[in-house]
Amino acid sequence: MRTYIVGNWKMNFTVGEASLFLHRLMQKIHPSRDVQVVVAPSTLALQPLSLQVDRRRVKLAAQNVCPFDYGAYTGETSVAQLRSIVSFAIIGHSERRTLFSETDKDIRAKVSACIRSGITPIVCIGETFRERRDGETADVIRDQLLSALHDVSVEDLSKVIIAYEPVWAISSTKNSRLAPLDKIEEVVSLIRRTLTHTYGEKFSAEVPVLYGGSVNSHNSSAYLSIPGVNGLLVGSASLISSEFIAIIDSIKNIREA
Ligand code: PGA
């Protein structure tokens, strides 16, 4: 399976800054069948960057989508409008769940809309600190996963990526802390078992599972070495080009090990 390195730029960079970053990134990255580099700029930058990007090197992701194609949805951007611009979309990020009150039902609709439009959803799931402390991690993960994929058929499962992001490990979370490797491995294995139980081994084996939460160039090799982890979703470290490139380069360490 390919290794995915996804940079979530959140609400950072002007269009000019995003364009310059992409330019630098493309100079450093060689087309590869084993590695997929993805960046998720703000919606405003997506269209100009889509004209600039060399899709053999880097692909673009939206940070959010509206599940409806057209209509009276002020301030939203639809999958129909994004279809020719992005290859991926981050869906159900914890910031969208908590700051913008996105529900499991919204996330399910967005996942389906992406698949319908040929956009690969990167579905984020993860427990909060309180949920982990109260022993609810497994239930939360299973519920979020099965709810998001509720309308995804077995044939479409290969068009989905899952990102496990414990909310308490995301750098912008108050008092965030690094997730221990064994805790990540436990949850990633639970995700795979849940997919296998629902869709069967053959189909679930095709779903990439990424890890995200305070990933940087010092810990990326360790996170990439966790059994079952197929890539990384990177937030703050993806805003520094040397850091992001070092994270991409750390894949080589794993392959050579
Ligand atoms: P972080 O963000 O790498 O800054 O922790 C990850 C994310 O929010 O996707």
Image (cartoon, helix red, strand yellow):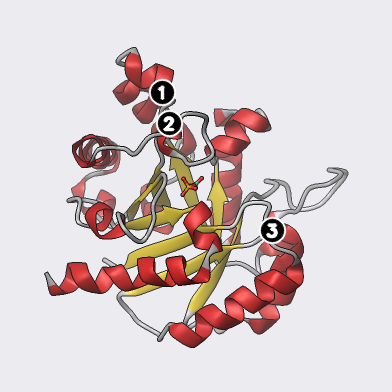
Q: Are marks 1 and 2 in contact (CB under 8 Å)?
A: yes
Among numbered discs 1 and 3, the one appearing first in the sequence:
3
Q: Which residue is mark 1?
A: 129
Which residue sits at x=61%, y=50%?
113
**Which disc, if any, is residue 42?**
3
- Answer with left or right where residue 205 lies relative to residue 39: left
**Residue 145: x, y in percent?**
40, 35
Q: Of the residues shown, which amino acid type is indicated by label 2?
A: Trp
Which residue sits at x=34%, y=16%?
133
Give the foreground label among 1 and 3: 1
Q: Of the residues shown, which amino acid type is indicated by label 3?
A: Ser
**Residue 196: x, y in percent?**
23, 41
The residues bearing labels 2 and 3 have C-alpha atoms spaced at a distance of 24 Å
- Local crowd at mark 1 within 10 Å, few (<14), some, or many (≥20)? some
Q: Is residue 55 in sight in this rendering?
A: no
Give the foreground label among 2 and 3: 2
- Answer with left or right where residue 207 lies relative to residue 253: right
- Answer with left or right where residue 84 lies relative to residue 148: right
